[in-house]
Image (cartoon, helix red, strand yellow):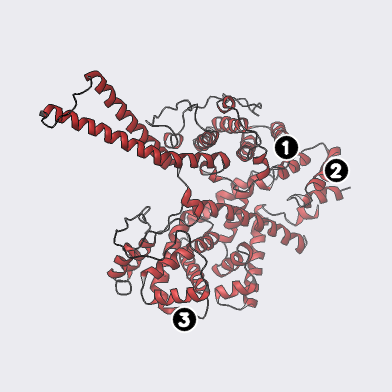
Amino acid sequence: MVQPGSHLRPVPADAPATDLPSAPAPVSPRAVEQLVQRAQAGEMAAWSRLYQDNFERIYRHVRTLTGDPHVSEELVQETFVQALLKISSFDNRSLFSTWLHGVAINVVRNHWRAGKSTERAHAKLELVHALAGESDELGAAVHRKQRVKALYAAMEALPEQLRVAFVLRDLEGLSPEEAAQRLDITPGNLAVRATRARHRIRKQLVAWGILPGEQEQSK
Amino acid sequence: MTATTDIDALDVLGDEARAVLDEAITRELRDVSPDFVAVIEAAHARDPKRVPRAALDEALALAPIVPLSSESSQRISIRDNAELRALAAELRGEIDAELAALRRRGIPPVPVPSASPVTNLASRRLWLWGTLAAAAAVLLAVASPMLATRLAASQGDPNQASFRERSAEGSQASEREQPTPTPSSRRTFAPALEPTTPEPTTPEPVTPDIADTTAEAPVSKTRKPRPAAASLGEQLRDLDAEAEAAWQAGDYAGAEARFRQIVALSPGSRAADLSYGDLFTLARQRSGPEQEKALWREYLAAFPRGRYADDARAGLCRRGEPDERPACWQQYLTDFPAGVHRSQASRALDEP
């Protein structure tokens, strides 16, 4: 979908003036609301501004959800495509950015569903074997990336709902209320999901030897 | 296993994940090209009624989405840099060749209004040379400040570009303390410190597309000596790219030699600090425990508070003589009260 470099299109000399600054300035909630209204009316300049203002934070969100830099850019683009097609359903009950994050979560979920394959399981096994040969002799810093990969591998085994809850709470550091709002569930429900996710992840990481197990801890 | 220790261990991993992700995302965002028109094109293709052709035309007429941060807008990629230099070199060569040919033929007659076709040709050639020279001058005038800016940035931040694959966080202090390299040291590639495993320090040719990214034009597949004028930042980036390429090609000795060169070229710098991380990994794969310990000690002597100091210290404590371990861990806790290995240190001290 994304064509590298295609954004570098020539700008016609008589192109209409655009309000796009070279670096996006902070936009007030009222201004965002107006931009959204203009976007809902089909005004591309407004969409362009919303895209520019939200691209980075959606990229961060998607990247944290997937842990995969290779798919994140495309999923972000897909998020904005979906948002463009669904903008009429946005009813201003939440912030536009919150709604957009929700769209991104759905896009990532679809990606996860499409990606269920033995390939991932094999990759996971490979990772575990690779880590099994490494003791804790050197420690976390050098192996930090591998440990993070292991964390994401453990997350692979989680149901989507638990995985998203864990990412929002533990990796994005959102408050229970914020995370619950993103998922349109109650904070209590969110807390249950996040706790279950942590329990399962911990169990898996202990089994892989990434986190200390009961016997090691008691030594 | 208590719930508290479990949660702590997972929390530590969560903290690590956040740090790794934040660093990676920041790096990736420098290279991401937001493409608004591609979004509109895709939406139009899926639902032309909701996103009509007119919307696509409107998007096409808008200014392109600019890079997200001021930093990225000021960046010149290595490839762009190399291409610019290649073009400038090509132009210079063309002009030099034309001037040499002109000298061989002698100065053409001054054109007069009633000039013959021959003198008209000469006049056109002069105009061509003049145009070429002017174009080159304009190009160099435009390119030089950009290159200078880029090179200056490279000097100040060797972690850019080729160092993107590794941590962006780091000790600013160590950078500030970095001694200014002398011209001779910039061209000295022999490591100042003995490598863990002695290897030839003369790099072998590596993957051309990586090794040549910053090479002067014309690009040669055979690695050329680095130009004397190459800045330290450029040399470090070249070495890092070569090390990565060698590593990927399975040439661990070559990778190790290059990381050693980075350490020797820029002692105390962030680049050197990062290179030690790779040297640790290589040593673990290729050397014995004693060599690893020697490397950790060497690192700690250079970077007592470096990014791997915590781990190196803990590694030495684990591998220390049994009767020395308690004191080692005690000292670790004193020096790294919030260290990643503090739990293990405490457990070791609690043991009878």
Quarter of the image holding residue A214? bottom right
Number of the label disc, if any, that sits on residue B326: 2
- Residue A47 x/y as whole percent: 40, 69
Closest to the camera, between mark 3 and mark 2, is 3
Question: What whole-number distance in Å separates the C-alpha atoms at marks 3 and 2?
Answer: 63 Å
Return the residue at label 3: A91
Mark 1 to mark 3: distance in Å?
A: 58 Å
Callout 1–callout 3 Cβ contact below 8 Å: no
Q: Circle 2: is it few (<14), some (14-19), or many (20+) Cα within 10 Å? A: many
Count neighbours of disc 3 (C-alpha within 10 A) and say few if under 14, some if 14 to 19, many if 20 or more. Answer: few
Sooner in the amino-acid sequence: mark 1 or mark 2: 1
State whether discs 1 and 3 lie on one chain: no
Q: Amino acid at mark 1?
A: Leu
B230 relative position to B178: left or right: left
Q: Are marks 3 and 2 in contact (CB under 8 Å)?
A: no
SS assignment at label 3: loop
**Amino acid, disc 3:** Asp
